[in-house]
Amino acid sequence: MADRPVAEMTQLKQSLLMAELAMVSYNDPDEAGRAADSIGFPDLAFFERDGSQAYRFRNQYDCVIACRGTEANEWNDIRADVRASSVLAETVGRVHRGFKREVDDLWPMLETALMCNRQPLWFCGHSLGGAMATICAGRCLLSHIDSNPQRLFSFGSPRVGNPRYTQYTRLDHLRYVNNNDIVTRVPPTWFGYRHCGSEIYLDRRGQIRKSGFAGKTRDRWIGFWRGLMKGKIDSFADHSIHQYINALGQALDQESQAASRKEKSWKKIKSGPPRPKHDTKKSLGPDASVR
């Protein structure tokens, strides 16, 4: 529940909340409204043009822009994903043509909606929505809009632009990658594309893991073969937003348990060693009589 400002939450709580809002953005406005209200964002605005969609979620503390990800049965989304040629960005460098077109459809409406925003502003998205949120947050940062993005959260996002674009458009960006998620590997680097932000890698067990190229490669191979043994293609299964939410929920549970253990340990230290029991006979003195 978003019962306090997002900035006051831990990074994991922020990430889980944004993953849930990214998942909510796949729903139609009625369902999205009920789901967003249940997690603390009762104010909703829906933006749509030519198949490109995004939501603005608000409560008394914050404003969140969530871009909708890829729908397998939507030709507009498939066309955006496969169009790997790049075009000049609106600022510096080059970006993916299909992703830019999706944002171009929505940006006039989003820009108008954000002109009067006075709340802390956050961006999030999954899959194609992650790429769109990246471009939207970059435009917002470099535009005349008064409120700048506090942080961008992307889950299973493809690469968005070339090195010049990613280096120029610097954002506080947490980019989650789940094990073998194939979408995070496209468009290929030999086309000139690079990832933005700080990568947070979720291993085959769904745990946040810091490791280098060799460690991740080994973990991905193990995840791939174990997926085959279960009759699934790990590269596609790992792309599900539900996988990201489950992993973040698990990590948050572990964080809460660790905080609880730390608090108990601290209370024990503050209370000091147990005091010896009071010996009434000694305290009465030599001349006292005991009845």
Image: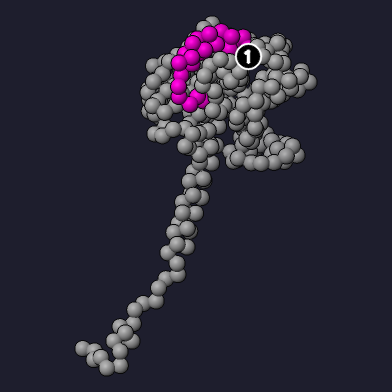
Q: Position of residue 263 (x, y in %)?
A: 46, 54
**Of the pair 76 and 85, the residue shown nearer to us:** 85
> Horizontal placement of 221 versus 144: left or right?
right
Quadrant of the rendered structure where residue 166 is? top right
204 above or below 123?
Answer: below
Quarter in which the N terminus is drawn: top left
Q: Is residue 150 visible?
A: yes
Residue positioned most to the right:
190
Q: Amino acid at mark 1?
A: Phe
Quadrant of the rendered structure where residue 288 is? bottom left
Magenta residues span 99-123
Residue positioned most to the left:
291
Residue in view at x 56 percent, y 8 percent: 105
> Horizontal placement of 128 versus 31: left or right?
right
Q: Position of residue 208 (x, y in %)?
A: 60, 40
Residue in view at x 41 percent, y 34 percent: 4
**Of the pair 92 and 215, the residue shown nearer to us:** 92
**Of the pair 241 and 267, the residue shown nearer to us:** 267
Residue in view at x 70 percent, y 24 percent: 167
Q: What secondary structure is the magenta-colored segment mainly?
A: helix
> Horizontal placement of 261 versus 216: left or right?
left
